[in-house]
Image (cartoon, rainbow, N blue to C red):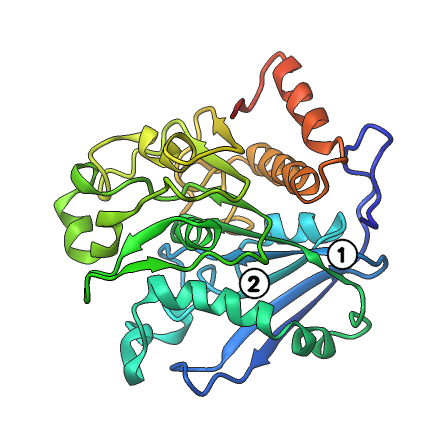
Amino acid sequence: MSEPTTSAGLPGSPRPVLSVSPVVLAAPDRAVDLQLRVSVPVTGSGLPVVLLSHGLGFSHHLSSLHGYAPLADFWAAHGFAVIQPTHLDSRTLGPDRGNEAGGVPHWRSRAEDMRRVLDRLDEVEAAVPRLAGRLDRDKVAVAGHSMGGHTAGLLLGARLTDPDDGAEVDLADPRIKAGVMLAAPGRGGDALTAFTVEHYPFFLTTDFSRMTTPALVVAGDRDDSAFLTVRGPDWHTDPYTLAPGPKSLLTLSAAEHGLGGVSGYDVAETTDEDPARVAAVARLTWAYLRSALDPGDPAWRTASGQLAADARPVGRIASK
């Protein structure tokens, strides 16, 4: 993995980043063509790929390829190729765009967007200057925040029952070797509010028991998401507690749903804005992905040890 690190496996000096958008993949079967942002370091080869799925939120542009710069910039500056799609439920496409022109409900189309990207990586490479031949296609991860965390979960092996036809849905992709789920929804059933059941009925049958791909679950201990769940902050730890290993859980102290503001720089909708927390999330998720995609890399072990030894840690880590 061509990436600058210290001898201890911690982030080295960041590289300049080349970010290109929109990279457009023609999609005649989709309501609109799929638009991507691709961010890569200007030097280096053998770049692992991270597919980054945006959440919903209240802002018009953060729920698109324009969001999540604090994560995308850091990951790209430290050796990853980060690909960000604009899903059909993005506010940039207008209200309910995902259900226009025969579009499928967004929970499914989001995962299909990611599979489409992997199917057409040759086109993505060709659209970005000096990227051809630099991607390591055997090292692919998915990450997502909030609704994007749900998308990541489906690609990692979580199942659900289609509320329209009652069929079990399996969207796991074996090309994806690891994942990061940030403030992701938990289990369904009696954990959900009436609002969630009405507006997000696909959450009702979420099943993590077959989500076998290695993943890091990141949750805030003050993320009560009261409009979605009656459970409180622990709901967001379900992808860890209800899934088989190998999994790790990073619980962030005093963090709410924005986890300090991961969806963008100076985000007004973030109720717990904390640049130091965002920096820690970027660094720790980077370390996890390095080691998950390359088991010989010490980055995650080193970062976990530093967190445990910190006199005022940003959170705590559990693993199984």
Q: Quadrant of residue 59?
A: bottom left
Q: Which mark is residue 47?
A: 1
Question: x, y percentage for residue 81?
Answer: 70, 58
Name which residue type carries label 1: Leu
Evaluate whether residue 200 shows in this view. no
Q: Please tell me whether mark 1 or mark 2 is closer to you in this view.
A: 1
Question: x, y percentage for residue 251?
Answer: 47, 27
Q: Residue at x 29, y 40 (%)?
A: 187
Q: Which residue is mark 2?
A: 84
Q: First in sequence: mark 1 or mark 2?
A: 1
Q: Which mark is residue 147?
A: none
Q: Residues within 10 Å of mark 1 (few under 14, many from 20)?
A: many
Q: Quadrant of residue 47?
A: bottom right
Q: Is residue 275 above or below residue 267?
A: above
Name which residue type carries label 2: Gln
Q: Nearer the viewer, residue 133 or 22?
A: 133
Q: Is residue 19 above or below residue 47?
A: below
Q: How many marks?
A: 2
Q: Quadrant of residue 223?
A: top left
Q: Nearer the viewer, residue 242 or 86?
A: 242
Question: x, y percentage for residue 143?
Answer: 53, 50
Relative side of 138 to 65, left or right: right
Q: Residue at x 68, y 20 (%)?
A: 306
Q: CA distance from mark 1 to mark 2?
A: 16 Å
For the residues labelled 1 and 2, say whether their Cβ atoms are less than 8 Å apart. no
Q: Nearer the viewer, residue 144 or 257?
A: 144
Q: Residue at x 69, y 37 (%)?
A: 291
Relative side of 231 to 47, left or right: left
